[in-house]
Image (cartoon, rainbow, N blue to C red):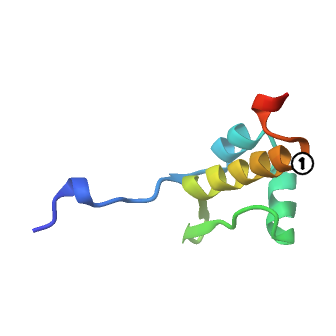
Amino acid sequence: MIHAATITCPRFIRLPEVQTITGMSRSTIYRWMGEGRFPQQVKLAENTAVWVATEVADWASSLIADRDRQVGSPASA
């Protein structure tokens, strides 16, 4: 028997939430996806595409880590 607490499901987010999280426009999101600079969508249905929330969060975290490597840690500022 599998307990519900042991199942981890990805959280899907739609474009408006991705825009809110990233502060980027729709066109920039799609352009960066095409350039391999942003996580790809998951197609749920013919007219429904979503992003995996953890992939968007990991992408944002990697930008912060890159910044910190370039300028030093925030604590040293």
> What residue lies at 70% left-to-right and 37% top-to-bottom?
20
* Residue 15, x across and y down, in percent: 67, 50
**Horizontal placement of 35 versus 61: left or right?**
right
Residue 10, can we see it? yes
Residue type at tag 1: Gln
Frontmost residue, 57 versus 20: 57
Seen in the picture, residue 45 relative to 26 is either above or below; the reply is below
Task: Please give the name of the residue rendered at 76% of the width and 61% of the height, measured from the top-left corner.
Answer: 38
In this rendered view, identify the residue nearer to me: 63 or 19: 63
Q: Residues within 10 Å of mark 1 (few under 14, many from 20)?
A: few
Residue 71's spot in the image, x, y percent?
90, 42
Residue at the extreme front of the image, as rendered: 76
Position of 41 compared to 10: left or right? Answer: right
Q: Is residue 70 above or below residue 49?
A: above
Q: In which image quadrant can residue 37 be found?
A: bottom right
Look at the numbered disc 1 and give the secondary structure of its residue.
helix
Q: Is residue 64 above or below residue 4?
A: above
Mark 1 lies on residue: 70
Q: Quadrant of the C terminus?
A: top right
Q: How many marks?
A: 1
* Closer-to-camera residue (70/33): 70
